[in-house]
Image: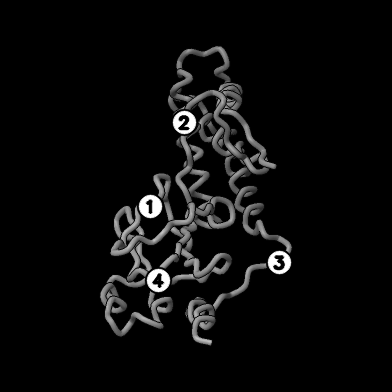
Amino acid sequence: MARTVTLSNMRTRVRQRSDMVNSTFITDAEINQFINDAIAELYDLLMQKFGDDYFTVAAPEGSFVSGQLDYPLPDDFLKEIGVDLKIDSQNWVTLKPFMFVERNKYNTLLSRGSLAYSSTYYKLVGNNLQFTQIPGNNTKFRLWYIPYQPVLVADSDTFDGFNGWEKYPEIVASITCLNKEESDTTGLERELARIIKRVEDASQNRQAGMGYRVTDVRNITNDEIGIFNR
């Protein structure tokens, strides 16, 4: 269950931390912006180190269209995590990206036919997901990606602090308020350093039951494609 907090509650805490509960020096709209900017910072902090653990989502299955190699990315797309190819009602295989210099390597008659699946690769091109070829009839694809962090607008909009990590944007927003007022921020900066360390330490391994292991990414596709060549 998510531990969420509303924008209104976060703004109240920012005013409390910066001793501006009854102040009109900084408007609610400004504090909302400070909070959203700080949430984006926290999002980047988590994403750069552990983004696939906390933010990865799967886009709805896409259907290949005859003659079409490019498919639009989701509107909230930020970073790609992986692409799968659906080969029947329940089985998927992992696709690999192609390098730009390889853009024509798999688009030949020799790479089609019985080898169609094993020569299907993808690449992000602009705002599209591009494939080297249409792998076959009735095939679908699935994109795993990290979306942009939504901007909180309404007072009732919520932010998932996971385990109290909403303190990070609240403290950063409070420091921004005090900086604008040209007031001392030393105490809050010490508190910010503590919460940064806490977030970094606590978020490193969400899958705590078993540690991560090295994966041979070179052979993933070949191993999976073997089911077509039996």
Could you say which is closer to the camera, residue 94 or residue 45?
Answer: 94
Residue placed at 49% from the left, 37% from the top? 38
Residue placed at 33% from the left, 72% from the top? 99
Question: Which of pointers 1 and 2 lies earlier in the amino acid sequence?
Answer: 2
Mark 4 surroundings within 10 Å by alpha-carbon count, few (fewer than 14), some (14 through 19), many (20 or more) = some
- How far, Cα to Cα, is label 4 from label 3? 38 Å
Residue placed at 66% from the left, 41% from the top? 2
Question: Which of pointers 4 and 1 lies earlier in the amino acid sequence?
Answer: 1
Q: Quadrant of residue 211?
A: bottom right
* Amino acid type of the residue that numbered disc 2 sits on in the rendered structure: Phe
Mark 3 surroundings within 10 Å by alpha-carbon count, few (fewer than 14), some (14 through 19), many (20 or more) = few
Numbered badge on residue 73:
1
Q: Determine whether label 2 and label 4 are within 8 Å by CB.
A: no
Looking at the image, residue 90 sits to the left or right of residue 111; the answer is right
Residue placed at 73% from the left, 63% from the top? 209
* Amino acid type of the residue that numbered disc 1 sits on in the rendered structure: Leu
The residue where tag 4 is placed is 136
Question: Which of pointers 2 and 4 lies earlier in the amino acid sequence?
Answer: 2
Q: How is the image coloured?
A: one colour
The residue where tag 2 is placed is 34
**Residue 126 locus on image (x, y percent):** 29, 55
* Amino acid type of the residue that numbered disc 3 sits on in the rendered structure: Met
Q: Is 104 rendered above or below residue 77?
A: below
Question: Which of pointers 2 and 3 lies earlier in the amino acid sequence?
Answer: 2
Question: Which of pointers 4 and 3 lies earlier in the amino acid sequence?
Answer: 4
The residue where tag 3 is placed is 210
- How far, Cα to Cα, is label 1 from label 2? 29 Å
Which of label 2 and label 3 is nearer to you?
3
**Residue 128 locus on image (x, y percent):** 33, 56
Q: Is 159 rendered above or below residue 56?
A: above
